[in-house]
Amino acid sequence: MGALKIERYSNSEMERQAGEVARLRVLKGADQGSIFIVKASSIVLGRGDDADVRVADLKASRTHARIDYTKDGWIVSDLGSANGIFFQGEYIRKFGLRSGEHFTVGDTIFEFLVSGESTRVLTAPMRSGADVEQLDQALAAQKVRVQAYSKAPKAAAAAPGAKKFNPRTLVLVGLLAGAYFYMNDEPPKKAPAKVADKKKEDEEKQALASYLPNGVAKEVGKTAEQYYRQGFREYRERNYLRAKSQFELALEVNPNHALARHYLRAAEQDIINETKKMTSSAQQSLNAGRLHEAKGYYEAAMRLMYNDKSNPDYQDCEDAVKKINLELERNRQ
């Protein structure tokens, strides 16, 4: 275990420690009750000797997952484990992690807290593993139900003699809607629903709520629209990775959410564009002999490509950083 990265305790009421940036609390598993104080921006979780956060969990891989702090926040990445990571009701390979959220590695449930939380939050009693498992199961069920409701009904056969809808009209309407959307600071408000449509919507919400266990409806009740709006806010702040994650969640809940799909593609393209700008700036700084500055640009580009490490551009940036580190080391000697 990397002693400088992690400190382990068994006291759930452990006060904030010097150098602490975050903490992982084990809510369920062989290490239940343990507290891992994180003192680094990148740590590895698993059951092997090379893991920073080492757990006695036979279902966890030796190096199961990594948690990194990036300019877009904390990111959890699966390291090719056999069982994956369970988060927000599904198995997933990469995701953004916020303070107060939990995830499962093997049979171990971790709760994540950042050091910026109040002492009361950091030392609060742990939730039971059964409670968080119930919450995850409810969220998984809700996603399935919402997706089923979101499927578009089959179009009825056109009446004899009825006029066909001109595709060009649809394109024009789409362009006008897009122009309106870009000219406003906030996403466009929906037009008032008809009474019948509103009644149907209310019935669907009630039906969804009936599938959720008591006490968890509020926590798992996010809709595709809420995910989309969160993504849109991140997109406006140029946090493209986090925006991409929210748009993907919106589409998991409602695959027919057109705006989420549109902005997902836009975020992906912006990530590509930002990466090119970073690598170009890095090369200019390198040519000017500003090694630290060049290294910063390359590392920023790598963070943008964290989910595509097989990308040749990622490999080029990684190689450039290694060369710069060697040069900086030689200069210090």
Image (cartoon, rainbow, N blue to C red):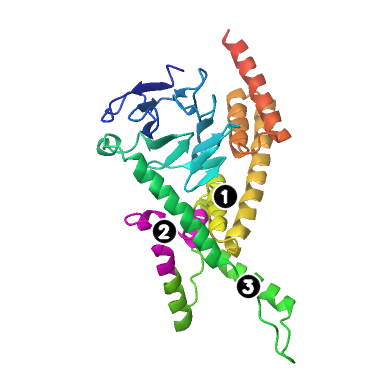
Asked if residue 41 is positioned above or below residue 262 in the image, the reply reads above
Marking on residue 221: 2
In the foreground, 289 or 333: 333
* Dots 2, 3 in contact, CB < 8 A: no
Q: Is residue 64 left or right of residue 198?
A: right
Determine which residue is flagged by label 1.
244
Q: What residue span does the magenta drawing correspond to?
A: 205-233
- Image quadrant where residue 80 sits: top right
On the image, the x and y values in percent for residue 104 come to 46, 38
At x 42%, y 53%, the residue is 138
- Which of 163 and 285 lies nearest the eye of the viewer? 163
Q: At label 3, which amino acid type do we have? A: Leu
Percent position of residue 136, x then y:
43, 48
Work out whether mark 2 precedes mark 3 in sequence or the reverse, and give the earlier one.
3
Asked if residue 212 is among those painted magenta in the image, a careful observer would answer yes
Marks 3 and 1, the one that precedes in the sequence: 3
